[in-house]
Image (spheres, rainbow, N blue to C red):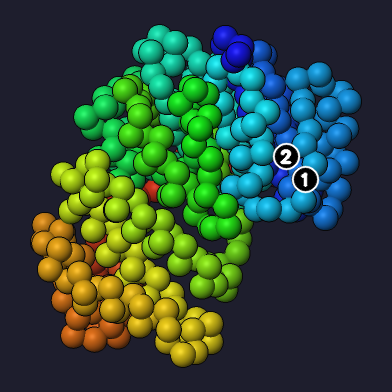
């Protein structure tokens, strides 16, 4: 039996000794106090397990699970089995939340009878905070997305995000939907199964979640495991073919964009794809599905041009993007709309 208006916060923990206090303190110091905080020590080799146990001794709302390492999905699944609250929130252990986030989300869910509430978020760097203000400002009222629109917004991934974190879920909605184990970008494999059941989704434009951006370069840290995101998008596409055929063009656009990005990343990391196995797989997919991909991209001039260049030769697209980048640096092209800096980091990183 789930406890009414109680919020279960699931925090997977692995090798985050440097960040764990900032994360857990931000949860325990919420203005909303009817919480249980489930810290899942996923076999962390550092001091995270001991730190989690210390929190349990100091605060009766804290539960701690120690398990052998199984990855983020496995840790979240283990935490979900312990949930007793009407609502569930996921927080990644190197992130942190604003003091009134959970109170605002619970009040909003109860007021609007929302199945899922999503708050806006900051991209939190060591020296700055960035905010995406292309669609809403932080002064706007909450936005209701109904059942007919929510899956479209998820596939577009601009307003409704694929991330599991930064959202308040009715626990009964997600209790029977475990995350897929052994993959990166596990949220892409999961979110559409949740949204398929949602009747009312609520967007809160105020940023209340701090999504920490480590300084590792994606090029330097890239591995072929990053291709899991393409696997996830294709699995979701198969799901849409069954339940949401009107969204197939948007889905193909996403797959095409991500395929081109990862082909370029593989090209820049050629040592990790010496036999060109993964680049050939991407090229074969694009050639096999050229007709629907081309149809999906026809209203996106940039994407359509990239597809045509790629079909001539993949290096043509890489050269095209490189040229655009240089032109933007020289102010010969307008920079794409994106993130704005809203405030400087201070004591949060100390």
- Residue at horizontal 33 percent and vertical 22 percent from the top: 200
Picture mark count: 2
Q: Earlier in the sequence, mark 2 or mark 1?
A: 2
Q: Nearer the viewer, mark 2 or mark 1?
A: 1
Q: Which residue bears the numbered disc 2?
A: 40
Q: Secondary structure at mark 2?
A: strand
Q: Position of residue 129 (x, y in %)?
A: 53, 44
Question: How busy is the neighbourhood of tag 1: few (under 14 within 10 Å), some, or many (20 plus)?
Answer: some
Q: Please report the residue visible at 72 percent of the width from the left and 39 percent of the height from the top.
A: 40
Query: Closer to the camera, 152 or 289?
Result: 289
Percent of width and height locating residue 55: 83, 30
Left or right relative to 4: residue 334 = left
What is the quadrant of residue 62 in the picture?
Answer: top right
Q: Quadrant of the C terminus?
A: top right
Circles 2 and 1 in contact, beta carbons < 8 Å = yes
**Closer-to-camera residue (229/104):** 229
Up the image or down, 225 lies above or below 88; here it is: below
Q: Is residue 149 left or right of residue 66?
A: left
Q: Residue at x 41, y 56 (%)?
A: 232
The disc label shown at residue 67, or none: 1
Q: Where is 45 relative to 149, above or below? A: below
Residue located 77% across and 37% down the image: 65
CA–CA distance in space, label 2 to label 1: 8 Å
Vertical position of residue 339 compared to residue 120: above or below:
below
* Relative to 155, 308 lies left or right: left
Among the 4 quarters of the image, the one containing residue 318: bottom left
Q: Secondary structure at mark 1?
A: strand
Residue 201 drawn above or below residue 257: above
Q: Position of residue 346 (x, y in %)?
A: 66, 40
Place of residue 36 in the rendered image (x, y in percent of width and height, measured from the top left): 69, 22
């Amino acid at each position: 039996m789930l406890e009414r208006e109680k919020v279960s916060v699931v925090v997977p923990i692995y090798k985050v000794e440097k960040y764990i206090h900032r994360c857990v303190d931000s949860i325990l110091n919420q203005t909303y106090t009817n919480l249980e905080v489930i810290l899942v020590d996923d076999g962390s080799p550092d001091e995270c397990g001991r730190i989690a146990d210390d929190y349990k001794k100091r605060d009766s709302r804290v539960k701690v699970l120690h398990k052998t390492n199984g990855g983020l999905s496995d840790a979240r699944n283990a935490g979900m089995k312990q949930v007793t609250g009407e609502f569930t929130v996921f927080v990644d252990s190197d992130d942190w939340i604003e003091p009134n986030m959970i109170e605002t989300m619970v009040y909003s869910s109860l007021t609007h009878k929302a199945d899922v509430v999503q708050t806006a978020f900051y991209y939190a760097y060591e020296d700055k905070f960035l905010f995406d203000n292309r669609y809403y400002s932080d002064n706007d009222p909450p936005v209701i997305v109904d059942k007919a629109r929510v899956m479209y917004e998820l596939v577009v991934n601009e307003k409704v995000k694929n991330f599991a974190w930064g959202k308040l879920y009715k626990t009964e909605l997600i209790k029977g939907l475990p995350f897929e184990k052994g993959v990166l970008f596990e949220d892409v494999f999961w979110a559409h199964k949740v949204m398929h059941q949602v009747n009312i989704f609520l967007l809160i434009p105020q940023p209340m979640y701090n999504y920490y951006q480590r300084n590792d370069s994606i090029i330097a840290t890239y591995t072929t495991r990053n291709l899991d995101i393409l696997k996830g998008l294709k699995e979701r596409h198969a799901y849409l073919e069954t339940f949401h055929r009107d969204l197939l063009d948007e889905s193909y656009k996403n797959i095409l964009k991500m395929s081109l990005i990862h082909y370029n990343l593989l090209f820049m990391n050629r040592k990790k794809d010496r036999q060109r196995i993964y680049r050939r797989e991407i090229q074969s997919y694009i050639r096999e599905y050229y007709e629907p991909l081309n149809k999906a991209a026809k209203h996106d001039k940039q994407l359509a041009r990239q597809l045509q260049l790629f079909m001539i030769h993949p290096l043509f697209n890489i050269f095209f993007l490189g040229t655009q980048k240089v032109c933007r640096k020289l102010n010969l092209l307008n920079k794409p709309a994106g993130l704005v800096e809203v405030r400087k980091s201070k004591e949060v990183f100390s």
